């Protein structure tokens, strides 16, 4: 079972989590300070192509993090689905980037480096942080006037793999080669514009470049785990639970949770569109198994109190969808026991029976057993039954909300 990343606060408590966060922050600040990033004059030189150490340090960090993340994912040590990726808001992101870039040029700091300068009591760093706080206050007071623009052009968890529709390994190689090319170009600029001596750079950078290329090539060769690979890792634990019917909930339990306001209920109907149109549970989303992959990142961003219930005509298709979602680390996923067929047997009323031509004499697995003379959709009582009419139904409750192990936040210094 893929163990990382760890959910620090739910697993070890707030004290340990905050201590880890503090240590990471101190280490990050130390690296910035030791790199000279508390000096605005040094930072500003990158915009004149005289000293590109800022570019080199941060781009090196990006490439190293990329190689470690996808390398760990390739060997099954890390679940990439649980890594936070900042959602993309295209136009507001572009405008915000331009504002930050202009501020960086004028002030000589970005938010992270300004805090480093503040910690070392640099006057310009102190003033920059104060200016940043004023900007935060102004934005907070005016954000409601630009909500549409600020939240518009939302693309969710968008990565280079999504944009270019290329395998992860190919993107890793391309980003690595791009970084090395830009490092080479940066050195040329530093020599021609900044007057740096040709032999001032450490020779070890060539070894680092080779390590980067080799690591990227290995990651591309090994590839990233598929949903099937992920399921094979967790199957020894999950399959016995599935066989013991720990995740198949009775229709009455699902009905009860319709009215549980502490839950964010998401019902995924994985049947064909025609069966969905004939009858479906109120507010169920019609998503076939083939349509699930692009939605995984959105499912991960749902609130921690989200309960997913997968529905098909019987249980076979719902079970396959459940395996896929669980393999992709979507939390709190359950299967509707008996599917829509059992749901109709349990909750059908005279209204549905008036449109029902009867139960089929012969049917196969995952076939709707009832023949309707009209497509009712969710416009009938059985789609949203009244709980008080079915209080006498007995069932064994199975839903146990798990701690959410999914991306929950992130940021940049």
Image (cartoon, rainbow, N blue to C red):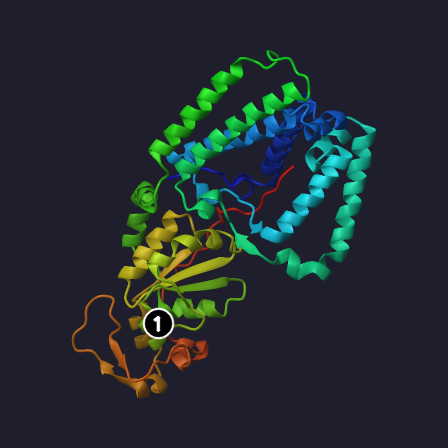
Residue 374 in percent (x, y) is at: 32, 83
Q: Nearer the viewer, residue 379 or 136?
A: 136
Residue 333 in percent (x, y) is at: 40, 56
The C terminus is located in which quarter? Answer: top right
Provide the secondary structure element on which disc 1 rests.
helix
Residue 246 visible in the picture: no
The N terminus is located in which quarter? Answer: top left
Looking at the image, residue 74 lies above or below residue 303: above
Q: Residue at x 36, y 75 (%)?
A: 277
The 10 Å Cα crowd at callout 1, few under 14, some 14 to 19, many 20 or more, is: many
In the image, farthest residue toward the front:
192
Looking at the image, residue 161 lies above or below residue 350: above
Residue 191 picture quarter: top right
Looking at the image, residue 366 lies above or below residue 12: below
Q: Nearer the viewer, residue 256 or 159?
A: 159
Q: Nearer the viewer, residue 11 or 176?
A: 176
Q: Is residue 19 left or right of residue 45?
A: left
Q: Is residue 92 left or right of residue 391?
A: right
In the image, farthest residue toward the top:
199
Residue 230 in percent (x, y) is at: 34, 43
Looking at the image, residue 48 lies above or below residue 311: above
Residue 398 visible in the picture: yes
Residue 356 picture quarter: bottom left
Residue 183 in percent (x, y) is at: 56, 25
In the image, farthest residue toward the left:
362
Q: Residue at x 63, y 48 (%)?
A: 94
Q: Residue at x 34, y 83 (%)?
A: 352
Residue annotated with mark 1: 276
Q: Nearer the viewer, residue 328 or 256?
A: 328
């Amino acid at each position: 079972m893929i163990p990382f990343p760890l959910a620090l606060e739910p697993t070890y408590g707030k004290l340990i989590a905050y201590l880890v966060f503090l240590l990471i922050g101190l280490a990050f600040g130390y690296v910035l300070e030791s790199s000279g990033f508390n000096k605005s004059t040094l930072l500003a030189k990158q915009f004149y192509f005289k000293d590109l150490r800022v570019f080199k340090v941060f781009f090196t960090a990006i490439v190293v993090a990329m190689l470690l993340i996808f390398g760990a994912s390739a060997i099954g040590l890390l679940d990439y689905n649980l890594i936070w990726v900042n959602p993309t808001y295209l136009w507001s992101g572009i405008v915000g980037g331009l504002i930050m870039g202009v501020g960086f040029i004028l002030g000589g700091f970005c938010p992270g480096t300004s805090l480093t300068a503040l910690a070392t009591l640099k006057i310009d760093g102190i003033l920059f942080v104060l200016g940043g706080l004023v900007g935060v206050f102004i934005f907070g007071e005016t954000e409601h006037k630009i909500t549409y623009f600020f939240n518009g052009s939302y693309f969710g968890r968008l990565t280079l793999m999504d944009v270019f529709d290329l395998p992860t390994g190919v993107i890793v190689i391309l980003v690595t080669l791009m970084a090395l090319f830009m490092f080479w170009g940066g050195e040329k600029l530093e020599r021609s514009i900044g007057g740096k001596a040709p032999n001032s750079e450490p020779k070890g950078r060539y070894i680092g470049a080779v390590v980067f290329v080799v690591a990227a090539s290995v990651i591309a060769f090994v590839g990233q785990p598929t949903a099937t690979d992920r399921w094979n890792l967790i199957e020894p634990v999950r399959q016995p639970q599935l066989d013991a019917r720990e995740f198949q909930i009775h229709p009455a339990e699902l009905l009860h949770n319709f009215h549980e306001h502490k839950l964010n209920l998401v019902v995924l109907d994985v049947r064909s569109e025609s069966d969905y149109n004939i009858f479906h549970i109120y507010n169920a989303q019609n998503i076939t198994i083939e349509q699930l992959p692009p939605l995984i990142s959105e499912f991960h961003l749902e609130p921690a109190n989200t309960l997913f219930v997968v529905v098909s005509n019987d249980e076979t298709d719902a079970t396959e969808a459940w395996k896929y979602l669980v393999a992709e680390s979507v939390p709190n996923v359950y299967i509707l026991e008996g599917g829509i067929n059992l749901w109709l047997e349990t909750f059908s009323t005279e209204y549905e029976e008036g449109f029902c031509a009867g139960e089929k004499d012969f049917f196969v697995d995952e076939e709707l057993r009832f023949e309707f003379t009209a497509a009712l959709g969710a416009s009938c009582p059985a789609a949203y039954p009244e709980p008080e009419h079915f209080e006498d139904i007995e069932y064994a409750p199975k839903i146990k909300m798990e701690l959410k192990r999914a991306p929950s936040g992130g940021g940049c210094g």
